[in-house]
Structure formats: structure tokens, C-alpha cells
């Protein structure tokens, strides 16, 4: 399984849409077999999603991500764990322990939303427009 | 009123978002407008790193506040975007300043930001500068189109867009243009069905002074206006045989003759044509030239009808409500469950445009809160009521929802995972609805759950 984490200053990059670097981890049987860092040169959302698809990424852990980019990644069958915050090592160890997403490592205001660990094939029948008020949930 | 309280009142009343950070980048103040723009409450924001809360495109590469800390100078009106908890990109402009105590020691920084969503919406409407990000979809069919779009945009080949009215053909044509090397040149859209043939001829190719009575000066045609850019020929299936010949010449030889001209003009124009008609059938019937059809049919994109991408309906509703909230200043929060069932079961002959009109109608009747069935146009409610006369709205909506799920299950051979994907809902939501609505699923049908099918 190939895991990608968007990184910045040894942390999860705050905005994947603007992120410039990812760390790739090949994980087998719960252990890291290989680790490498890659620059993301693509600014364009389609190209960025395609690049991760070419790298064979199965799961992406990232910070904030826009819906269009999430949809494009989903079309490459990439599972996204979005709105994650924290140091890379903490995030990796939580992931290996099967404990991501984790409310302690989620960006403020983002826990419990439909984004959680989405494969993004569908967003659920939810219409939530004002995150402060919670809106209506139909899921 | 003491001065600090006065300042607080002022900061809370302004429309711009304001937050302050200490020297460790922790948020120390977060005003009401900042809550509203970012979608994050003050309680959630205070004490957290600003980049975790603000999540702007500038945080990583070129944080304006970091620059202000370095240089001591304010940054004014830097543009970027932030991402809200529901994944929406909000365009913003940011200004920064240093915070000092009474001794002049730097104790932090302040950032003010303005939501430019309305400005951007209006700009896009006026200029037509739509991009891939403006396409609201999670539909696999549309995503396949989006994935190919950069290559299609990079080529200079003619594109033929096929799809029913209101499926977004012009939006896609604009997106292709705006991702192409011609993006800084004009995009000219022509509705070929809107003008009589003789007018369309001079409208497309222009005319020379004296070409006919009343032609007292040269008039450039749309091809001339689109030089270096893209021309979008909508309703191409409706043009006359004579015009088809002239258009064929443009596509083959890249030249055209304005009416009354003695020499040909060069056309450095990319052609994107669109139609809601079955061009292949028109060719068979001899009503559309075969050679023109093949010239147009270089890159062919078929846009699915909205009823074939129902999973996008909630996201599109979300998008339109957000947009009308911005434009009207109302605070509609969403759609009630029964109204949503109606939305999901309707067939939308007018596609996305019709959905947009329905939401606009609801905005007239609904002031705030959720859009309910009573806010929807009569024809939509009657569409359901006509199918099952004598039932109340609640049970109509319930029946519509059940029918929708049954249809999706049948189309997917009762594979519940596939049906959930098509309907744009999570599989466990579908399982719950199957049970609640008493939908029968044949035993042994596929699904990830080991639960027994509801009967």
C-alpha cells in the first residue's frame, strides 16, 4: 500500500491545493518498507491529481483540500484522509496504528464532517451550507 | 465606553475578517466576520496555529504575516484563497500589520481579510472566465471529461460538444478556452439557432461596405472578432445547408469571405461546436453534411443529462444556494429532507439550468432556514402528485425516494455499493434507507454488509 502525505516544515501541509511536496511511504503488513520525498511541480488541479495517480498512491493524508481536487483524486481511486494536522511522525504512527482520522489531529471545525476518510465517490445527501450552524443533514 | 471595549465593538461589527496572532503563530483574537468567512467558530480558532485555522493558499509558500514580521512593513491586498471545512475555495484579499505593546516591542501580528466571492462570481459572469474548478461534479462521466480537458485544451483541434439543453455545454467550452494557449484572446459565443440564416451569415463572417442596401460600412463578423481566440457555435445542428458549406471551408482551409468581399480572410480561430440534436441522425437524413460532421467531430464530448448524474444534485443545490445567498444577502441554510427527495426524484428536462431556476424560485419564497416543499414551483410538486393522486406531500416525497432507490438498485443489478455510488450517498445511508422505506432486495445480491436485506 502506498501512502502519500503532503508535507511542509515536517508537518502536514495546511492546504493540499497549494502544497509543493509529498512524502511517499510504501507500507506492507503495517511496516514502512520505503520512504521518499517528491516535489509537486503541477499547479493545475487535474495535473496534480494525475501525478499522484501515476505515483500509484492508494491513500493521501493531507490538510485542507478543495472539493474539485478531492473529486479528481477519487477518480484515480485515491482514498483521502483530509484536514489532518500535526507532525509527520505523529501522523504516520497514528495511521499505522489504524487511528486516523483522529479528532486530536484534525483541523479546527473539520471533525465529523462528511469529509472524514472519504473515498469521495459520493458526498452523501447532505446540504450543509453554514458550518457554524451545522445546517441540515440528510444522510 | 472604555477604549478596549469600543475597539472590540468596532472589530465585531465590520464585514472584514480579522484575527491576531502572538509571536508563536497562535490565534489570540478572531472576529465575527472571520467566523463567518472561514466557517470556524471563535472557540475552535483561539489558541490554534493560524495556518490550521486560516488554511490559505499563501500559508505555505509566502505568508503575508511572516513577510510583515520579517520586514516590519504591512502587506496590503494580497490575493489568494482559503478552504472552508466543506471544501469550498473562498477567494480573499489579505492585509497585515504588526502588533506592538506600549514599549514598542512586537507582540504579534494582525491579519484582515475580505471575502471576494461575490466579486469573483460577478467577474466570472461578466468575463466568462470559468475554469475546471467551476464544474460542480463528482460524476465519474464528468470527471473523465475533466481529466482529458487539459490535453483537449492544449490541442487546437475542433471540439464537438453533445448534450441536452442546460447540461453546461457553454461552461465547458469556456473552460476549454480558458485552459488553452488562446485564453488571453477572445472567446466569442454564437447561438446559431437564434438568428435567421441570412443574418447569421453576415453575423459570422461580416460584410463589406456596399455589399447590400444599408451596408454603409464594413462590419466585422464573429470569426473576425474571435481572431486568435475561440468561437463557440451553439446549436450547430440548426444551420442551413448553404451555411454548412461556408463553415466547412473555414474548417478545411482556415479562410472565409465576408459578404461582398473580393478576397478571402484568414481565420486563426479554434472552433468549438455544440448541439443538443443527434447530428449522426441528421447526416443519415441528409439534413447535415457528412463532410462537415466529420470535420466537427474531431474531439467529441458528450455531456450527460442531469438525471443520469443524480449524485451531483445535492452538490449543485449546495452550490446554487451558496451563490444565491451571496447575490441576495439571504441566509438559506439548505434543503429540507422532503424537498430533497423531490429534487432527487425529478427528471429535469431542462437539466442544470432548470435546477438553478428552481432554486431561484425557492429563494423568492423562502427567506431563511431550509427550503421546503412549499417553496418549490408547483409543476415540480404536481409532477409527483400527478403520479400518485390523493397523497399528502410527505408520503409523496417518501414514495419518490423509495422509487428512486429501487430504480438505482435495479440499474445496478441490486449491487448496493454501486447503487449508493450512483445516488451519491454512503453505503450505510443506503442500507438505512432501504430498511426504513421497506424496499425489497433479492437475497444474495451484492453489498458489503452482512446484514440481511430489508423486506
Image: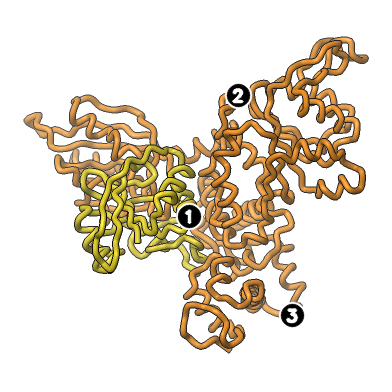
Task: Give the color of chain A as drawn.
Answer: yellow
Please give the residue where the numbered disc 1 appears in the rendered image. A76
Distance in Å between CA atoms under marks 2 and 3: 58 Å
The residue under the point 49% across, 73% down is: B427
The residue under the point 85% across, 36% down is: B239
At which x and y percent is residue B290?
A: 85, 40
Left or right: where B379 falls relative to B67: right
Residue positioned most to the left: B103
Q: Secondary structure at mark 3?
A: loop
At which x and y percent is residue B379?
A: 74, 63
The residue under the point 87% across, 46% down is: B282
At which x and y percent is residue B2?
A: 18, 41
Check the residue under mark 3 and report the chain it is in.
B
Figure quadrant of the N terminus of chain A: bottom left
Please give the residue where the numbered disc 2 appears in the rendered image. B185
Left or right: where A30 falls relative to B77: left
Left or right: where B41 falls relative to B69: right
Distance in Å between CA atoms under marks 1 and 3: 47 Å
Disc 2 + disc 1, Cβ < 8 Å: no
Please give the residue where the numbered disc 3 appears in the rendered image. B390
Q: In this orientation, which residue lies closer to the viewer: B131 or A54?
A: A54
At which x and y percent is residue B384?
A: 71, 71
Between tags 2 and 1, which lies in front? 1
Residue B394 visible within the image: no
Distance in Å between CA atoms under marks 2 and 1: 33 Å
Amino acid at each position: 500500500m502506498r501512502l502519500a502525505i503532503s508535507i511542509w516544515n515536517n508537518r502536514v501541509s495546511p492546504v493540499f491545493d497549494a502544497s509543493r511536496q509529498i512524502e511517499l511511504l510504501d507500507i506492507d503488513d503495517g511496516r514502512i518498507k520505503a520512504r521518499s520525498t517528491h516535489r509537486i511541480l503541477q499547479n493545475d488541479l487535474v495535473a496534480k491529481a494525475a501525478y499522484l495517480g501515476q505515483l500509484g498512491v492508494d491513500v493521501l493524508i493531507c490538510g485542507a483540500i478543495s472539493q474539485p481536487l478531492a473529486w479528481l483524486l477519487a477518480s484515480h481511486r485515491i482514498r483521502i484522509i483530509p484536514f489532518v494536522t500535526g507532525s509527520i511522525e505523529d501522523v504516520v504512527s497514528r495511521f499505522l496504528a489504524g487511528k486516523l482520522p483522529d479528532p486530536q489531529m484534525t483541523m479546527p471545525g473539520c471533525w465529523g464532517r462528511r469529509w472524514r476518510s472519504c473515498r469521495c465517490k459520493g458526498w452523501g445527501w447532505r446540504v450543509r451550507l453554514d458550518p457554524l450552524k451545522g445546517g441540515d443533514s440528510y444522510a | 465606553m472604555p477604549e478596549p471595549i469600543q475597539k472590540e465593538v468596532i472589530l465585531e461589527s465590520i464585514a472584514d475578517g480579522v484575527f491576531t496572532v502572538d509571536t508563536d503563530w497562535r490565534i489570540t483574537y478572531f472576529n465575527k466576520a472571520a467566523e463567518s468567512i472561514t466557517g470556524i467558530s471563535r472557540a475552535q480558532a483561539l489558541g490554534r496555529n493560524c495556518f490550521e485555522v486560516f488554511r490559505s493558499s499563501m500559508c505555505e509558500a509566502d505568508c503575508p504575516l511572516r513577510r510583515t514580521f520579517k520586514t516590519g512593513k504591512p502587506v496590503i491586498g494580497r490575493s489568494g484563497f482559503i478552504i472552508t471545512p466543506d471544501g469550498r475555495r473562498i477567494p480573499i484579499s489579505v492585509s497585515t500589520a504588526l502588533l506592538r505593546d506600549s514599549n514598542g516591542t512586537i507582540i504579534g501580528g494582525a491579519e484582515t481579510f475580505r471575502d471576494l466571492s461575490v466579486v469573483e462570481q460577478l467577474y466570472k459572469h461578466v468575463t466568462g472566465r470559468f475554469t475546471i474548478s467551476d464544474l460542480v461534479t463528482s460524476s465519474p462521466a464528468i470527471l473523465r471529461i475533466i481529466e482529458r480537458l487539459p490535453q483537449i485544451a492544449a490541442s487546437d483541434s475542433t471540439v464537438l460538444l453533445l448534450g441536452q439543453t442546460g447540461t453546461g455545454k457553454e461552461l465547458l467550452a469556456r473552460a476549454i478556452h480558458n485552459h488553452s494557449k488562446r485564453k488571453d484572446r477572445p472567446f466569442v459565443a454564437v447561438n446559431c439557432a437564434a438568428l435567421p440564416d441570412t443574418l447569421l451569415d453576415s453575423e459570422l463572417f461580416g460584410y463589406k461596405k456596399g455589399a447590400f442596401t444599408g451596408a454603409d460600412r464594413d462590419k466585422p463578423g464573429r470569426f473576425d472578432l474571435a481572431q486568435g481566440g475561440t468561437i463557440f457555435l451553439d446549436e450547430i445542428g440548426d444551420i442551413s445547408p448553404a451555411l454548412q458549406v461556408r463553415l466547412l471551408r473555414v474548417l478545411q482551409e482556415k479562410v472565409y469571405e465576408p459578404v461582398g468581399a473580393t478576397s478571402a480572410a484568414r481565420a486563426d480561430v479554434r472552433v468549438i461546436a455544440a448541439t443538443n440534436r443527434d447530428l449522426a441522425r441528421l447526416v443519415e437524413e441528409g439534413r447535415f453534411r457528412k463532410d462537415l460532421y466529420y470535420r466537427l467531430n474531431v474531439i467529441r464530448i458528450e455531456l450527460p443529462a442531469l438525471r443520469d448524474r443524480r449524485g451531483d444534485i445535492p452538490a449543485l443545490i449546495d452550490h446554487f444556494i451558496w451563490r444565491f445567498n451571496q447575490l441576495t444577502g439571504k441566509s438559506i441554510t439548505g434543503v429540507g429532507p422532503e424537498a430533497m427527495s423531490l429534487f432527487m426524484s425529478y427528471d429535469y428536462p431542462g437539466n442544470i439550468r432548470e435546477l438553478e431556476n428552481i432554486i431561484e424560485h425557492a429563494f423568492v419564497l423562502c427567506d431563511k432556514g431550509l427550503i421546503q416543499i412549499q417553496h418549490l414551483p408547483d409543476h415540480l410538486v404536481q409532477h409527483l402528485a400527478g403520479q400518485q393522486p390523493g397523497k399528502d406531500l410527505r408520503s409523496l416525497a417518501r414514495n419518490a425516494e423509495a422509487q428512486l432507490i429501487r430504480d438505482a438498485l435495479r440499474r445496478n443489478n441490486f449491487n448496493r455499493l454501486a447503487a449508493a455510488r450512483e445516488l451519491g450517498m454512503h453505503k450505510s445511508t443506503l442500507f438505512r434507507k432501504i430498511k426504513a422505506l421497506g424496499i425489497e432486495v433479492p437475497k444474495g445480491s451484492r453489498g458489503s454488509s452482512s446484514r440481511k436485506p430489508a423486506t
